[in-house]
Image (cartoon, rainbow, N blue to C red):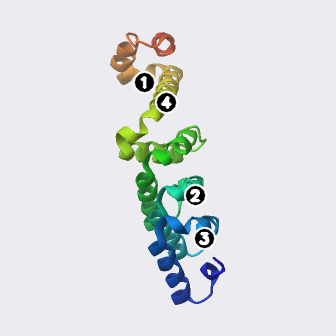
Amino acid sequence: TQILRDVEKEIRDSAFQALAAIGSEAKQAVPALIQALKDQNSDIRRNAISTLREIGPAARQAVPSLIQLLDDKSLVVRRNAAKALRELGSESVPDLIQVLKDQDEVVRRDAAEVLEEIGAEAKQAVPALINRWMMSLWFAIEALGDIGAEAKQAVPMLTQALEDKFSAIRDSAEVALG
């Protein structure tokens, strides 16, 4: 795993390829690959992700680091991280559920998109997704109420919210409509 930090690109690339070829048996390299996910060089981050994908479920401990890469400055790294999380499927769901509580809306949205792509294997995320949706809806209704008369185009939606099955939504809509 020391070779993953080699200065020579060809040596590093060969090490990543060798670990990927070994697959799940290379699980002892996962901590070093997690460190490589933090490298300044986007090629190293991308190679580390690809190698983790080949290791498969044995690389589950990399999920939190992969989730952080959903906000990477490199589009290729972001896409590869999302693909790795999708491929880990249900292995990544518990960590993605925790990310739904993140302060950053973009990070929460990215986690929800990965859960969407995982599909039925993400069924344990349903309560957290409903809660996130309810919080977003509740905040939107509260904001519309605070905007007041200038939010008149929202009246049909607020009126519909009066029929919502969740009392918090109904109550907020009632207050918003005044």
**Which residue type carries mark 2?**
Ala
| Amino acid type indicated by mark 3 | Ala
Q: Which residue is mark 1?
A: 151
Q: Which residue is mark 3?
A: 36
> Element under label 2?
helix
Mark 2 or 1: the one toward you: 2
Q: Tag 4 or tag 3, which sits nearer the N-term?
A: 3
Counting from the top left corner in percent of width and height, residue 73 is at 52, 64
Q: Nearer the viewer, residue 26 or 85?
A: 26
Mark 2 burial class by Cα count in 10 Å: few <14, some 14-19, many 20+: many
Q: Name the N-terminal-most of marks 2 and 1.
A: 2
Instruction: Assign a secondary structure to mark 4.
Output: helix
Please, what secondary structure does the residue beneath circle 1 have? Answer: helix
Q: CA distance from mark 1 to mark 3?
A: 49 Å
Instruction: Return the residue at label 4.
Output: 136
Q: Which residue is mark 2?
A: 62
